Amino acid sequence: MCCAALRSAVGGSVAAGSEAGPQAPATVTDRSRDVTQTNDFLRLIFVTSQVKPDHLGGPNAFRVFAAATAFVEPPLPLADVVAYPGLVDQPDQDLVAMRCTPSDPTTVDPILATWPNVFDAVRGDFAATYTCPAVPGSAENAVYCMANDFIDAPSATAVVSLAAALNLGVTLFADADRAEVLRRRYGIYPAFSGLGFAVKGGGDGQPMRAVDVLRRSVTPEYLLRNVSFGDGGCFCLRVPPYAGRETAALDVDFIIQRGGFGGCATVPRLEYARH
């Protein structure tokens, strides 16, 4: 189904299996935490004019971060949309906005971005390459074995269950080489909490207290397989820098109407979709 019919089919959608019309925020959030009911993803990146993306991420990435499109409908100023998933606006670079609704969700294999899910992904991604115990000096092998050893044991005390996963995350970040594996393969930076929610504004690298991290955890975040735009069912819009871009509204339906399917279409500025 491409491309006019697909534009019509996905324009304005919220999540797979949801009813038409307004929904209570609690319902939207609850459904968004279930990837079997969420199949409309938004990914924003900033690139220099020389970079010509054709995949969701760079060549070394196994997975990339994405947000649920439903959380930026109706349109919000670009600066706000960028802040919620923990990004930082880059006014001197091109904005690349991708909206992906894969016909077969298993193609992108979406997972909620929690530490336990990340450990599962690491197991699957590295299982064919490494064994345990890790070979000395191989950070990827070490990350694989640490993830492989993780046991998500149940507890009636919520913080006890969380502590095991968070402590392993702390250990992974404590070593620069292991942290680089997380960054290169999964786009995971120190601002990643692993709670399944992006830390709003966390991309600036500034230290945060626990109260700040929890207060800023507003929108769910996901990890998708790093597939081509076409395989991911993605429309892509590219917007070069211009004065006032950060205050312009990002209308996710505009990505569908003016974006390229399977490739990026360049537009001079952000606009509202025509309904």
Image (cartoon, rainbow, N blue to C red):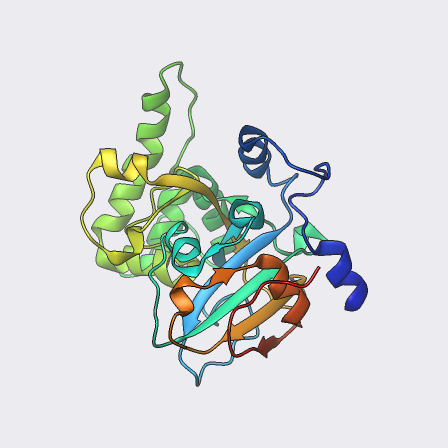
Residue at left offset 40%, top offset 53%: 80
Coordinates of residue 271 in the picture (x, y in percent): 56, 67
Name which residue lies at 76% across and 59% down: 8
Above-or-below relation of 220 to 188: above
In terms of image quadrants, where is residue 7? bottom right
Q: Is residue 174 above or below residue 116?
A: below
- Is 135 displayed left or right of 33 in the figure? left
Q: Residue at x 29, y 49 (%)?
A: 191
State the count of labels: 0
Q: Is residue 254 visible?
A: yes
The residue located at (44%, 39%) in the rendering is 196
The quarter of the picture where the N terminus appears is bottom right
Choose between 180 and 52: the one closer to the eye: 52
Q: Is residue 26 above or below residue 8?
A: above
Tell me: 148 left or right of 10. left
Q: Is residue 61 visible?
A: no
- Determine which quarter of the picture holds residue 198: top left
Question: Relative to the observer, which residue lies in front, 206 or 82?
Answer: 82
Is residue 101 or residue 139 the one in the foreground?
A: 101
Q: Determine which quarter of the picture holds residue 184.
A: bottom left
> Residue 39 location in percent, x, y?
65, 48
Residue 225 position, x and y percent, is 56, 57
- Residue situated in front as seen by the camera: 73 or 203: 73
Q: Position of residue 93 (x, y in %)?
A: 38, 76
